[in-house]
Image (tube, helix red, strand yellow):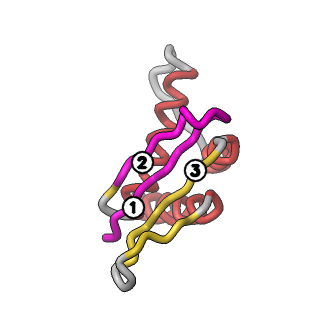
Amino acid sequence: MAHTILLVQPGPKPETRTFSDYESVNECMEGVCKIYEEHLKRMNPNTPSITYDISQLFDFIDQLADLSCLVYQKSTNTYAPYNKDWIKEKIYILLRRQAAKAN
């Protein structure tokens, strides 16, 4: 349970920057998925049910101007930065675990 801050910049302009904070890395990764799902809903307002695969999610992450996390490190009382590749790896692990639980 490491406090995690998600930094998002969807477009090229710095004014598009936002942040969210979460109680854990997993909650943060679920937050990234929710951002993508909200994007899909905006792009497909008349579609009642939207599905996607992980490659589409990763393409979305790659096209963001910036996406990074700051994860609290209890041992040093600091936040460590992580990039898009780290986020994608954590999302992959999270979704794989969720799929295993569903089966």
Q: Name the residue under label 1.
A: 4
Instruction: Give the x, y percent position of residue 63.
Output: 69, 41
Mark 3, secondary structure of its residue: strand
Which is more toward the observer, 34 or 21?
21
Give yes or no for residue 3 being in the magenta stretch. yes
Q: Which residue is drawn at 53% across and 45% down?
A: 8
Mark 1, secondary structure of its residue: strand
> Horizontal placement of 55 versus 52: left or right?
right
Instruction: Give the x, y percent position of residue 23.
Output: 30, 60
Q: Which residue is drawn at 65% across and 49% down?
A: 58
Q: In which quarter of the image is residue 26?
A: bottom left
In the figure, 79 relative to 27: above or below? below
> What range is drawn magenta here?
1-21
> Horizontal placement of 32 versus 77: left or right?
right
Mark 2 residue type:
Gly
Between marks 2 and 3, how big is the CA–CA gap?
Answer: 12 Å
